Image (spheres, rainbow, N blue to C red):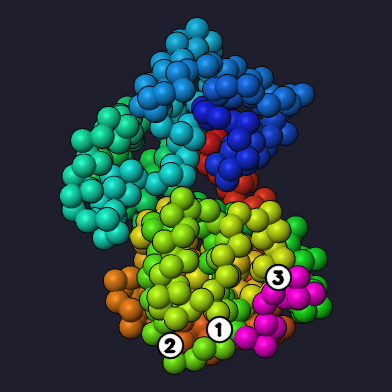
Amino acid sequence: MHVVLLKSRAANHGGLEKAASRIATAFVERGEEVSILTTGAPPTHPFIHFHSTYPSSWPAFLRMEQFDRFTRHWLQKNKADLVFGMDRNRYQTHIRAGNGVHAAYLKSRIFTEGRLKYLTCLCNPLHQKILQLEKEAFEYPGLRKLFTNSQMVKDQILDRFSTDPAKIQVIHNGVEWREMEHDFATWSEAKPRHCQALGLDPHFFQLLFIGNGYLRKGLDRLLEGLAHLSRKDIQLSIIGKDNHQGVYEAKAEQLGLSKQVRFFGSRSDIRSFYQVVDALAIPSFYDPFANVTVEALAMGLFVISSKQNGGSEILTPDNGTIIEDLLSREAMALALEQAISRPKTDERATHIRQSVEHLDFSYQLNTLLEACYV
């Protein structure tokens, strides 16, 4: 069988690119011929054929249209038994909607940036193009399977598009559960060393926030909830990048949190932080399924999240809590208090880690591929 994956910028190192590589490799291991249609200088692989185009660098909406046109022309000239889309293209037999539903994302911006910003986005050519491609892809008659990484995204698709529910299958994001075994097993002995290197107090309750784009990820709501607590023996480590980081640093100082909050920027040693902290907070206004949710659980952390993060579907009262109202400082503070009452111990961390063993990446990947053959 000839499997063709559609993934622009396949040479990047983000989560979607990593998933594309693993899916392609898994098809190769099953004996299939695999091609990847992409843009720019492609990576190399001994058993995967890359075919690349070089669209305009600007404007972005034109680049998307050019990539879609390239894939359609290529597929017209080359036989493909299965076309697996991972971006936003019009025509494919299988889609992994890892980006969620763009219309739902835009609507979520009302709560962070106001209705005027939302209406402005609807007039933006880039957003118009994404909405157009998304609709045509989800309603394409030749679509055989649509994979979502959360029930939340599935519901959003059914609310907005004429997509046959029978075509949609929810497969939660996988996690490198087995690969994390050593880092998890050594967290208690590694914690003092990492705390010293990072300037954190091992006797404080350690909280972690990870995310690029602080506004969508709800960092301002987290800071306000933290300031609402009477306890001050809590430190928050913030990982990720944002062009307006200075605004959040100023807000932390204004809220009297400057001694409790540390901004670390982009880091490659995420597991070191997982070893140090007691809990992760990911209060997103829109996340189809934030990978850090399941990563933190696999490292034994209690997780605070929102209903707008599809990853919250794997949370239980034993391994996390869901913020009832992101716009309520009191609701955020209540969620934080629930986490603080459960500091990380060997027993509690082991229990939390075991709650996501079934989401090991190999299991989830196998489920995805098996569904492609149905």
Q: Can residue 322 be seen in this view?
A: no
- Amino acid bearing label 3: Leu
Q: Inspect the magenta stretch and tell me whether residue 209 lies in it.
A: no
- Amino acid bearing label 2: Leu
In the structure shown, which secondary structural element does the residue marked by tag 3 occupy? helix
Residue holding disc 3: 198
Q: Disc 1 versus disc 2: distance between alpha carbons?
A: 10 Å
Q: Which residue is located at x 29 percent, y 47 percent?
A: 106
Extent of the magenta region: 193-204
Label 1–label 2 contact, CB within 8 A: yes
Q: Which residue is located at x 29 percent, y 59 percent?
A: 112
Callout 2: few (<14), some (14-19), or many (20+) C-alpha neighbours within 10 Å?
some
Q: In this view, does 177 lie to the left or right of 319?
A: right
Q: Earlier in the sequence, mark 3 or mark 1?
A: 3
User: Residue 30, image x and y in percent?
Assistant: 70, 33
In the structure shown, which secondary structural element does the residue marked by tag 1 occupy? strand
Examine the rendered structure and indicate whether residue 72 appears above or below residue 14. Answer: above
Q: Which of marks 2 and 3 is nearer the N terminus?
A: 3
In the structure shown, which secondary structural element does the residue marked by tag 2 occupy? loop
Label 3–label 1 contact, CB within 8 A: no
- Amino acid bearing label 1: Ile
Q: Is residue 120 visible?
A: yes
Residue holding disc 2: 229
Residue holding disc 1: 234
Q: Which of marks 2 and 3 is in front?
A: 3
